[in-house]
Image: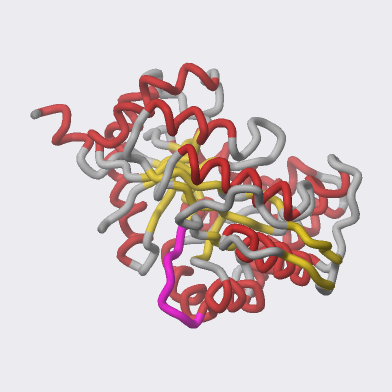
Amino acid sequence: MSRWGLTVPLGGMGLLDHAALVRQLPGWGYTDIWSSETSGADAFVPLALASTWEPTLRLGTAIVPVYTRGPALIAMSAATMAAAAPGRFVLGLGASSPVIVKDWNGLDFTEPYRRTRDVLRIVKQALAGERVDGRFDTMTISRFALEQAPAEPPPVMLAALRPQMLRLAGREADGAILNWLAAYDVGQCLEAIGTSTETVARVFACPTEDADYARTLGRRLIATYLSVPAYAAFHDWLGRGDALRPMHEAWAAGDRRGAAAAIPGSVVDDLVLHGSPESVRNKVQAYTDAGVTTPVIALLPTPEPDIADIIRRLGPVGSQALSS
């Protein structure tokens, strides 16, 4: 089955105002909606609401940080979502970033690989109905079991950027979640995963033919995200180290505007898709053609006024839906 996703909630739209939009998504060819969790909505509530608005969409978190909740709470939340949307929920876990974990939540961001591996193992055991009791590399769990484990445990996918975490996703998770990459980077990531498994890729899109607007926004976002050490290392591994070095140097010197300006246009165009909605849809399709199972569009602010129409036109059958 060919899948096509959208990131929710949309910026600038109230959470409850998404109901009508969510109900229309399947008719435009969307199969999935995936949440995120940074400084806006949490990862679970938008999906819980959507589960009551539309009965067929798959609902995924991309991602729930493994530091900001304990593994027992993550398992409880996932089990609750699995009960609310049987067979439709996917739990996506990830390490997150030092800003979110340490600066915003006051927690230590240490040993992210081991912490992520521990939480992945604990949550999967709990969701399978097992009692978790033992010492892990980064924590000890004493006799935890879900009061009501889901009859069908939801898949647990793992956000991964570099070979070690990508291999973990392929070896122990039910799939890998990719972020901030170009379509031509997909093959390198799949090779590192090493197994045939589902891959979800969040794809940033600014559907407008005002290229200057899209590139200005894209440069600002790329400078902010790719200055995070994990993303910087990811793009070094992908081969963009030299192209992004002037950005990193300006950012380290405190020159945020200069950092954005130093990003080459080719990098912006690879990582933030822009143009007409139809041309952006074709560029998203390139990720599927490269091996991604589920591309998930992250819609960025655009000067175009009719957001619902843009989302329709970004969908695989959006144009046909209008004419039918």
Of residues 150 and 18, the one drawn nearer to the viewer in this rendering: 150
User: The magenta stretch spans which residues?
Assistant: 194-200
Residue sitting at x 42%, y 45%: 86
Q: Position of residue 5 (x, y in %)?
A: 39, 45
Quick check: 301 above or below 199?
above
Of residues 304 and 289, the one drawn nearer to the viewer in this rendering: 289
Residue sitting at x 62%, y 78%: 163
Residue 307 appears left or right of 255: left
Q: Position of residue 44 (x, y in %)?
A: 59, 38
Q: Position of residue 303 (x, y in %)?
A: 46, 24
Position of the C terminus by quadrant: top left
Quarter-of-image position of residue 247: bottom right
Q: Position of residue 262 (x, y in %)?
A: 67, 52
Work out whether residue 232 can be spotted: no
Work out whether residue 322 can be spotted: yes
Quarter-of-image position of residue 1: bottom left
Residue sitting at x 70%, y 51%: 65
